Image (tube, rainbow, N blue to C red):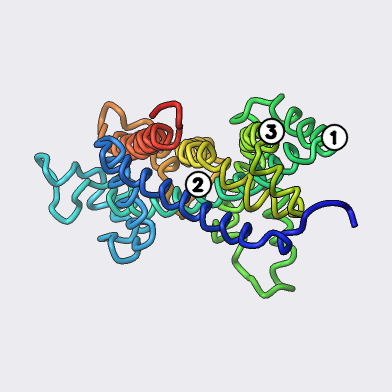
């Protein structure tokens, strides 16, 4: 006997704790939804992001034209609502005659896939490592935080560019060598490996910030009475972290995820613009900006359309992040 009380020896305590936790989570969700609906800017951001997600999911059905195929006869057409526009091309065409609206819709799929995967992976790594670092302390805390410090020593965007530029050629070459054996002919040339390289680089660089955030939250929570009580009842380390620490550390994590999604969209655009991200024939907002960078004075709409889309998406994430912070920060209420 180790002298600790076991959950089964205290009648009703585990069930009561679960009920109280579930009630607290329901109150938090209700407060969150109410706050988002009451905030007009956040509601606007939600609407924009829902439209982007719908465009990403249903790009095949929503795009009026093939985004990869152009028609030189109809190149550089202005938007349909301007003089000289063609009703068939609502937002005009680029210098190769490709429909701008269709490329924006398919670019939404690229941005959504890269940003969601990158932020999901970096959040998973950061939450797990930050929780273990803050709760276990000692050598585990020192090891995880020193690795994070090393990654923090490099400028984030430059580090992402370095990883993408150095890893991509070797990764693509490796896949090309093993395509025949794996029965995946054409995968290296399809452009889909670009997605893997981009979200892999972003997730690798993004986890240290999340880990530090979660570690700070865990350090402030692990000596609270409800955590000490769970330990006294014989809860394991995993049970304490999963049931008590992580749920109470989630509010700032949600805000960080919202901001991180916007940063991931921007990073994907920058990488594509530099030629080391998602490349043609796969449409990308960054590729559109790069391809039309010289059209600013002659055909400004070719550059303004993708640039305005990126700015609007980032602004939407900022609005939602601010609203989440107001709703979940007890000091702001």
User: What residue sits right under mark 3 in the picture?
Assistant: 219
Provide the secondary structure element on which disc 3 rests: helix
Q: Is residue 288 above or below residue 315?
A: below
Q: Are marks 3 and 2 in contact (CB under 8 Å)?
A: no
Q: Is residue 278 left or right of residue 104?
A: right
Q: Which of marks 2 and 3 precedes in the sequence?
A: 2
Q: Residue 233 appears at what percent x and percent y?
A: 73, 53
Separation of residues labelled 2 and 1 (CA atoms): 34 Å
Q: Is residue 264 visible?
A: no
Residue beneath disc 1: 138
- The answer to whether residue 93 shows anywhere in this view is yes
Q: Who comes first in sequence, dot 2 or dot 1? A: 2
Q: Are marks 1 and 3 in contact (CB under 8 Å)?
A: no
Dot placed on the residue nearer the N-terminal end, 1 or 3 = 1
What residue is pinned by disc 2?
A: 115
Q: In the rendered image, which quarter is residue 9 located in?
A: bottom right
x%, y% of residue 37?
A: 27, 43
Marks 3 and 2, how far apart at CA? 29 Å
Q: Position of residue 203 (x, y in %)?
A: 62, 44
Spatial CA span between label 1 and label 3: 13 Å
């Amino acid at each position: 006997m180790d002298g600790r009380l076991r959950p089964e020896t205290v009648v009703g305590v585990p069930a009561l704790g679960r009920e109280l936790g579930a009630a607290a989570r329901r109150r938090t969700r209700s407060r969150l939804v109410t706050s988002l609906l009451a905030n007009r800017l956040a509601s606007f951001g939600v609407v924009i992001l829902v439209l982007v997600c719908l465009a990403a999911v249903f790009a095949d059905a929503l795009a009026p034209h093939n985004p990869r195929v152009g028609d030189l006869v109809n190149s550089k057409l202005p938007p349909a609502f301007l003089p000289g526009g063609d009703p068939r091309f609502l937002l005009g065409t680029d210098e190769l005659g490709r429909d701008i609206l269709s490329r924006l819709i398919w670019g939404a799929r690229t941005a959504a896939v890269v940003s969601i995967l990158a932020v999901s992976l970096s959040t998973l790594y950061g939450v797990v490592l930050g929780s273990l670092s803050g709760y276990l302390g000692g050598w585990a805390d020192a090891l995880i935080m020193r690795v994070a410090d090393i990654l923090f020593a490099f400028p984030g965007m430059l580090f992402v560019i370095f990883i993408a530029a150095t890893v991509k050629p070797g990764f693509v070459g490796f896949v090309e060598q093993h395509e025949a054996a794996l029965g995946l002919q054409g995968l290296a040339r399809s452009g889909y490996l670009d997605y893997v390289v981009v979200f892999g680089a972003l997730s690798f660089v993004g986890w240290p910030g999340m880990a530090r955030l979660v570690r700070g939250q865990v350090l402030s929570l692990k000596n609270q009475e409800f955590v000490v009580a769970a330990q006294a009842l014989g809860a394991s380390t995993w049970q304490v972290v999963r049931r008590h620490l992580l749920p109470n550390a989630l509010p700032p994590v949600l805000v960080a995820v919202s901001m991180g999604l916007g940063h991931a969209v921007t990073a994907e655009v920058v990488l594509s613009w530099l030629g080391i991200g998602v490349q043609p024939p796969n449409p990308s907002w960054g590729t559109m900006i790069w391809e039309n960078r010289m059209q600013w004075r002659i055909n400004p709409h070719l550059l303004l359309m993708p640039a305005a889309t990126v700015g609007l998406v980032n602004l939407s994430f900022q609005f939602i992040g601010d609203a989440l912070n107001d709703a979940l920060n007890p000091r702001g209420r």
